[in-house]
């Protein structure tokens, strides 16, 4: 096979087409997973914060929380959001690493095919 | 493939591309792709020690926060001991390579200007005693903060 390829024209178009064909499902899957995960977390976060804020507002009105307590709790929620973003960013990096390995394998396959070893 | 028309001259001029040259180009392309991937941000692997630290500190922190129904002076030693342990956990996280995200999380916990665990102790010290409702709500919030630290650590790749 490799011997035959010695006399064949180097086909850039075929190489790029193969690369596109191998990489596009991986990229699509990565984008779909990320959008789903981040969207789900964001919605859950907003829902929980809303109910907490309602609860604290009532407790504040009832005199169970003073103004400082209320402000501290609200600021604490900003911390929760920051911590959640850091966690999601980290987990997203871990997922991306797995997809990178898949992409590397796909590219190796395409390139080896070009030299007749795939 | 209209977009690939720019490659046409290249294709024509390399009609008799030698096999060794082809392998050379393939290797260069592969190397470039690998460089592209290695340039992407990486993250530290899972650490059993970091995980246990976070779990233990969550339990200790919630227990110590419960004591805020009493005077701060009575429990000052416990608070100092806990703060020291949390600072050690932060330093441990900061010292691990590729661990910026986890160390940033610990930094939020120890920052006294951030409505964090350490702010809770500062408020307790200033107010001498804290309201039971506030303690309960803050405990739930701090528990969530620790869960997010634990969640990131447990999600890391086990090697």
Image (cartoon, coloured by chain):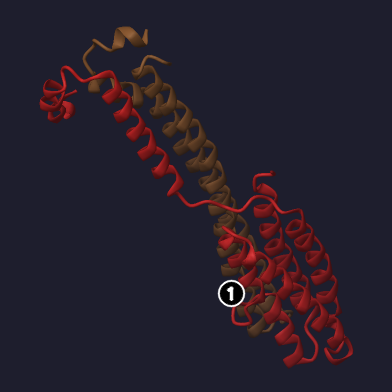
Chain colours: A brown, B red
What is the x, y in percent for residue B129? Answer: 80, 88
In the displayed structure, B21 sits above or below A43; it is above
Q: Name which residue lies at 63% across and 66% down.
A: B95
> Few, some or many C-alpha atoms within 10 Å of disc 1 (few <14, some 14-19, many ≥20)?
some
Q: Name which residue lies at 66% across and 58% down.
A: B148
Total marks placed: 1
Q: Name which residue lies at 59% across and 51% down.
A: A44
Residue located beneath label 1 in the image: A75
What is the x, y in percent for residue A13? Answer: 23, 21
In the displayed structure, B62 sits above or below B19; it is below
Q: Name which residue lies at 17% across and 29% down.
A: B3
Residue A87 falls in image quadrant = bottom right
Foreground: B116 or A50? B116
**SS state under label 1:** helix
Residue B26 falls in image quadrant = top left
* Residue B102 in the figure: left or right of residue B128: left
What is the x, y in percent for residue A96? Answer: 51, 42
Foreground: B53 or B25? B25
* Residue B6 in the figure: left or right of residue B82: left
* Residue B18 in the figure: left or right of residue B28: left
Q: Chain of mark 1?
A: A
Q: Quadrant of the N terminus of chain A?
A: top left
Foreground: A96 or A54? A96
Q: Quadrant of the C terminus of chain A?
A: top left
């Amino acid at each position: 096979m490799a011997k035959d390829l010695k006399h064949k024209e180097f086909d850039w178009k075929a190489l790029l087409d193969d690369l596109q064909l191998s990489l596009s499902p991986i990229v699509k899957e990565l984008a779909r997973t990320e959008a789903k995960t981040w969207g789900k977390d964001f919605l859950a976060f907003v829902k929980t914060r809303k109910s907490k804020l309602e609860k604290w507002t009532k407790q504040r009105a009832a005199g169970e929380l003073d103004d400082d307590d209320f402000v501290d709790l609200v600021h604490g929620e900003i911390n929760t959001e920051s911590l959640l973003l850091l966690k999601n960013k980290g987990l997203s990096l871990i997922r991306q690493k797995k997809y990178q390995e898949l992409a590397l394998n796909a590219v190796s396959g395409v390139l080896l095919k070009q030299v007749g070893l795939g | 493939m209209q977009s690939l028309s720019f490659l046409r001259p290249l294709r024509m001029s390399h009609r008799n591309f030698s096999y060794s040259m082809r392998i050379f180009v393939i290797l260069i392309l592969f190397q470039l792709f690998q460089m592209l991937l290695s340039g992407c941000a990486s993250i530290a692997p899972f650490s059993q020690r970091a995980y246990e630290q976070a779990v233990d500190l969550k339990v200790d922190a919630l227990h110590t926060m419960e004591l805020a129904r009493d005077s701060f002076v009575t429990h000052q030693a416990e608070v100092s001991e806990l703060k020291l342990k949390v600072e050690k956990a932060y330093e441990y996280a900061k010292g691990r390579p590729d661990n910026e995200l986890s160390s940033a999380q610990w930094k939020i916990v120890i920052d006294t200007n951030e409505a964090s665990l350490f702010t809770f102790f500062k408020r307790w010290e200033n107010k001498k005693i804290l309201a039971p409702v506030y303690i309960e709500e803050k405990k739930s919030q701090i528990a969530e903060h620790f869960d997010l630290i634990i969640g990131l650590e447990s999600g890391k790749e086990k090697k």
